Amino acid sequence: NAKGIANSLNPDTWPEFWLDRMDDTQDPGWPGSWDGYLGKNKFIDGQEIYYKMSDNLYDRYDYYPDSTDSTRKGLGLVIKCRALEFTDQPWEDVVFQIYKIKNDGTKPLTKICFTFGVSDFIGGDGDSQDDLTNFDLSKNLFWAYDLDGIAPTFGSDKVGMLGVAFLRTPNKTDSKEPLGITSINVTRAGSLFLYDDEKNWNNYFMIPNIYYDPASLTYGEYDYWLSSGYFSLQPGENAEFIIAILLANGSTVSEQLSNLNIKLKNAKRLMNSGFSFDKFKVTLDSPVSGTELSGNTEIRWHTSKDSGNVTIYLYYSDDYGENWNFLHEDHENSGSFLWDTNTMDDGILNLIKIYALTDNGVAKYEHEIPFTINNPDKNAPPQIVILSPAQNDRIYGEYGLRWIAGDADGTNYTVNFYYRPSEDSQWIPLAVNLTKSDTTYNWNTKILPNGTTYQILGEIISDSDTTKTQISGITISNERAIYDISDYATIRRKTIGTGSVEIHVVNPGKITGDEYKLQFDYINNDSQLVYNVFDLTKNLQKIKNAIQVDGTVEGPYFDGIRLFIHNDPLALNEELSGWNNPDVLPFQFKVFHDIDEYGEKRAADYLFVFGDVGVDTSTAGFVGKTYFKAIPVNVKIFNITENKNIDFVFIENDLTDGSGKFTTTGYLRDYILLLEKNKEDSLVYTYQVSLKDADGYRFPAKGDTLSIYQFKPFLQGDSLLFSTDELMSIKRNQEFLPDNFSLKQNYPNPFNSSTTIEFNLNKSNKVIIDVYNVLGQKVTTLVNKKLKPGHYAIQWEPINCSTGIYFLEFRTLNITKVRKMLYIK
């Protein structure tokens, strides 16, 4: 995947399609969907990463595993690798590593061993050489801990314990018993040479029933190798390994180990449940969502299991699930706990969550609607939480802003919302003086500049108390017609900046066809780059000192358009730079540096032309206290941006082929130091150029040229002229951001079995209709396809849903609308 490792939380990392899902006849490749361990678009509460490995490039041996591919080497293995990290509290300190190994060749593999490497670097930097380890084969568990439990990184807090457990391995030959950990070996940290295959197989860590003796090791830093023993794979056969990385705290080693074993037990339970929570059910009978509590309150639960070894964990949150606190542990399938709410702060954002764990399944239940705690003689500040958008969400069109707000004391309050495009912008009022009857607001984002750094501020004011909450990292991404400004530029004046400038069409009906001048300038003592736009046709200034030049937010609106400017930092353009002849040694180009002296960067491109010695003469100069004299050399250098020859100091360290020739041999390397004038008209060092040693290449000779091109920022005075005349014909008759559709409120509402949603489309559009609960969790997707113009009526019949409020979100390319629905069983 060219986008990197796929992460369930970031769709931008997902491939265009999943190669392992091409056999799906209904949706080949699952484009736009998550390929999860649990299935299509099935997400865990946390994050999952997914990547694949193969050994087809492993060519040390003359072995070909696939009779259908004579170029393939390695063993023919393909490994699907996943990591699952849950936010659910019983597993928040556990990372599950899953490896599904397939024999993708045509030859049987009769003797394979799986080895997992672990470093005992406990305590972090500044606390090495004091770690100890041990293992328990009956539990397939290895652990490492810090000798004194103290490390600078942790301050007065005790350093915790690291555990690694083999939860699932293939079975032994002719047996249903899993292999587990069958050997553990140790080497000094960093001493294992991974490229010596035979030695690693025979002497170190891949032979079963060889274990290091923990008592024989003094404390220090080691690498440990946990191996599975031998198993076989026939062509097309798979073997799955599931490893748990466990972290445990505690004031003593014995307490840490006890906590580690509890985490291991819970990790096994979650794995045995298939990493899902639907093996059975646990229900919270009281308190009921949305009620008000005070004093001693009974928490009651029951599970769908009549018997069995069960562990119950109760957690509560007083900030709508942002943070959870452990409340109670129990071992009754149906039970109760008396909770003294007087020990809690009053508030309206309280939730309770319950987990039920058995050896072959887990279940959880969480309040969907928060309840209030309001005890006498207590005064709590009002509370507010923004339900949508969430941090890092991408929004567009008319977006449904949703929130929960209130005061446990029952006093009246008002709610205000503000937004800003970035952290250094001013807050702009969005919706103010809202009351307790308001819980949603349709925000028209279409007229706002697209950007990736928006923030939303919500505040609730009750009597003299004010509480605020903030959401960051919001992307506003409305559909635009986008054009490269260079296609419409009539004159490009002194614009050496290589950054991109785009015309984003916001309102086609307002495009004038005028000619404009875009000009860059500096403000704030030349520390901040800005741009101005002048309408040359009407002799008006349209934009003054716009600061949006970093490619994150569109610029100010004018005449139906916005400019989107991405300013390049000064850096080498490796794609354009290089030799005219590929046989010449690789080069190194960087800013001059000598001890405490740094060169002055220049936004310029360069050309090095090589000839005979004497084609130019270097300039004499000091580097530090060392003086380098002027000598005849075989290179002449041009600043092609400013169209002039430049001076340079030639440091002759390598005399291969004689003096004055640009060469290198080993650590003996010639350097070229570029000299250019500063503001005081004095010559100063800017860049240095040298050659890199590489086999099969030659030194530069007569006729060779080296081109250096840089990505360059826009500078003061850079300008260009452009016209929007050609854009006049683009969607000339389109009205400004049309909303030619209608979405009705669902009916009936409230409802107790099913409800109908009606909407009209006047043109073909991709329509997505999702249903969310009040926690912002998606319950179901009702529509996800392109629809033709017409009238539509769809039904929703809730399945396994509890009584409460749900939100219907209707989305097209340009529109987002939200409707509130009330389901009553």
Image: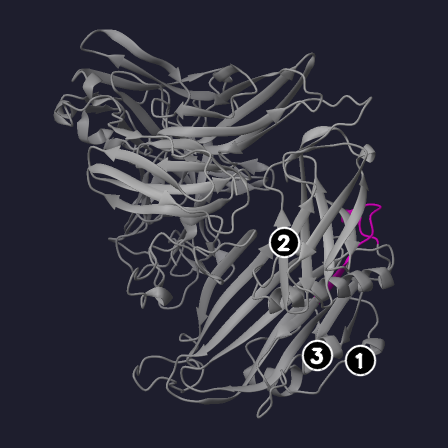
| Tag 3 residue | 185
Identity of the amino acid at label 1? Answer: Asp
Mark 2 nearby-residue class (10 Å; few <14, some 14–19, many ≥20): many
Residue 667 vertical position relative to residue 751 in the rendered view, above or below: below
Task: From the top left corner, tell me how far across and down residue 220 is, in percent.
Answer: 79, 66
Q: Is residue 674 left or right of residue 417?
A: left
Which of the two marks, 3 or 2, is nearer to us in this view? 2
Task: From the top left corner, tell me how far across and down residue 535 is, in percent.
Answer: 23, 12
Which element is circle 1 on? loop
Identity of the amino acid at label 3? Answer: Asn
Is residue 229 visible in the rendered structure shown here? yes
Span of residues in magenta: 150-163
| Tag 2 residue | 364
Residue drawn at the location 76% of the way across and 66% of the way down: 261
| Tag 1 residue | 213
**Which of 460 and 15 lies nearest the eye of the viewer?**
460
